[in-house]
Amino acid sequence: MKLGRTQAEKGFTLLEVLLATVVLAAAFVAVMSLLSQSLGTVARLEPHQRAWLHAREKMSEVLLREELELEQSRGAWPDGYQWDVEITPYRQEGATLPGRYGLFGVRIQVSWGEAERTKSYAVETVQLARQASGEVRP
């Protein structure tokens, strides 16, 4: 008695092929759904990334100055993002600096969006720099 299949009986049954197709289709749908969600997340985060890059650009621009002075200024980039720069004196108890140098608090705020749904990022740091004019007053 022969228990194996004959040459003519080897292969997959129709039921096995259909089941494999259903499993592959379900896996494909799951992968495409995850891909779609990922693309949606990337699209939602793009304005935040652009704001972060603008804040970094403006902060680098301010910190590369040879001299700093008290300042409050604002402006906008062509893509609709606005910036605010605030440079204030930074005082620390017991800290005295020689000559015309001082510590400055630098704050950059980048905002975007419509008036009722404005979003913003703020970046702050302290910078040691030469004072542009006289003494920095708190």
Image (tube, rainbow, N blue to C red):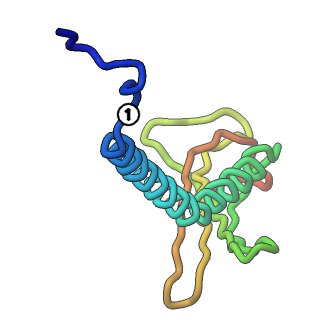
The secondary element bearing badge 1 is classed as loop
29 vs 14, nearest the viewer: 14
Residue 85 placement (x, y as % from top left): 66, 65
**Which residue occupies 53% across, 66% down?**
44
Residue 137 in sight in this render: no
Taking the view exactly as shown, the residue that stands out farthest to the top is 1
Taking the view exactly as shown, the residue that stands out farthest to the left is 1
Mark 1: which amino acid?
Answer: Phe
Q: Which residue is disc 1 drawn over?
A: 12
Relative vertical location of residue 68 with respect to residue 83 in this rendering, above or below:
above
Q: Quadrant of residue 74?
A: bottom right
Relative vertical location of residue 123 with respect to residue 84 in this rendering, above or below:
above
| Quadrant housing the C terminus | bottom right
**Which residue occupies 66% across, 60% down?**
50
Q: Residues within 10 Å of mark 1 (few under 14, many from 20)?
A: few
| Quadrant housing the N terminus | top left
25 vs 116, nearest the viewer: 25
- Report the side of 1 relative to 68 (left or right): left
Residue 54 in sight in this render: yes
9 vs 74, nearest the viewer: 9
Relative vertical location of residue 88 with respect to residue 67 in this rendering, above or below:
below
- Report the side of 28 relative to 58 (left or right): left
Residue 19 placement (x, y as % from top left): 32, 46
**Which residue occupies 73% across, 47% down?**
60
112 vs 8, nearest the viewer: 8
Residue 73 placement (x, y as % from top left): 71, 71
**Which residue occupies 63% across, 42% down?**
127
Total marks placed = 1
